[in-house]
Amino acid sequence: MKKVFFLIALTFGFVSMDSFAQNNLGKSNSSQVAMVATNIDENNVILTPAPPKKKRNNQNQKQEVVNPYPERVEAYINFEKGNAYYTRGGLNALDSIYLMTFNSSNNRFYKMTIIGYDDGGEITEESSSLARDRAIVVFKYFSSREETEYIIKRTPSTYTQSCVGEINYYIKYKMPFDFQWLNLYNLPEDEKTENGISLASKVHIIIEEDQEDCLGEYYDYDWPAQDTVLSGNHAKVMIPKGTLEYIHHTKDTIPYSCNIEYKEMLSFEKLTSNYSLVPHKKQYIINAGYIVVAPEKKPDYSSCASKDTITPTILISVPIEKQQQAAGLKFYGKTYKPNGEVVYKSISTKKIKDKDTKDVTLECYITPFQFDTIYLGKKVEEKEMGDYFYPAREGEPGAFEAMGGWLKPFKLNKQGDYIIKESMQSILRKPNGSYSAD
């Protein structure tokens, strides 16, 4: 019950100052923060910042939220003379400090200084290590609470994940500390006391907020880790940093690597050797080429809670040949119905013309949900299919199954040249060899 009282009193700053504190304590010798004292007993003292002065109520001003946990705590822990065992009052003081500064709701990031002192007598073989041993005992008190060789603190915080949003969690970190010990025998008398407290047989603890020292830089994990450009013989894909996924403001160790597989099927030979229409249940979309981008990490549409906030930022650009410029080609990518079903639909496509060279490039922006295959193509009616394809038999070069039978995008003459229908010729890249319209 006594420890609970000290925790409440120290945490919220409502501490009655006894005559000792009033007469002897103005400011801590090691801090410019005004401190008040709580005596655990006559030899063990805890110091916390004085509560802020209450301002007059003003209806037009919002009440400033005050952090209930102190930015600084000091304590003088008493030890039995001649040995490195703290007294019962010293243990009560340590418990009170721990309950306050290591509280699971305490959102401050602390570092700790531990300074051990001897009894102030003449140094002997037995007393030469007394100050150091006492400092070690206090250090072990705090480290033993986590059963580690370090002092560990957990501080409530938040991190942001691209598909989840802001998440509450605890940052677990090794508390920075400074470790000192001093023999008092040869010190001047005025240096043997501090804040009106005798340093003999004491360990002085200073716990103070220092977020930078505790955490250094917060880790930000982005996939890809930097702006990434993928390119093949024809197309180019630019994926901005963190587009596929990111986790910001975390101390966890997460691998930075994110392999991205890229391939393109835009040349005539590769495309027509294994031709297929863009997959769609109701419409015929002629496939004029496609690229595949398959990253190791990407958000899952079905489980992504922030899918509505993820905007198209991934740029795809494909230069098109002269005969393709009037064909009305568009990009086609995955879209999701409310029930999660995937269908391929046209993506807003821009035609960019170079003023000097007159070359034309098609561009579009997609989201990471639209990986992995992006098609370049054109929508046609069923009655128009004969303008693009020849009837075929299974096993013929370039033949594919469609419309209840077999079709092919070209045929070969006796010289091995490609014979392509005029409409098909207008949307495909030219083959390396010659071709002619049917």
Image (tube, helix red, strand yellow):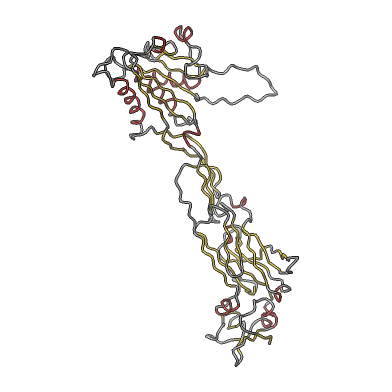
Residue 138 image point, x, y percent: 34, 24
Residue 1 image point, x, y percent: 39, 19
Residue 57 image point, x, y percent: 66, 18
Q: Is residue 315 left or right of residue 159?
A: right
Instruction: Report the front residue among 383 and 113.
Output: 113
Residue 150 image point, x, y percent: 36, 34
Question: Residue placed farthest to the bottom in the image?
Answer: 414
Instruction: Report the front residue among 238 and 424.
Output: 238
Q: Is residue 406 above or below residue 281?
A: below
Q: Quadrant of residue 275?
A: bottom right
Residue at image position (48%, 39%) is 169
Q: Is residue 343 above or below residue 85?
A: below
How many numbered badges does the structure rendering display? 0
Residue at image position (64%, 76%) is 429
Instruction: Report the front residue among 257 and 369.
Output: 257
Q: Quadrant of residue 342?
A: bottom right
The quadrant of the rendering that contains the C terminus is: bottom right
Residue at image position (41%, 35%) is 174
Question: Residue placed farthest to the right in the image?
Answer: 355
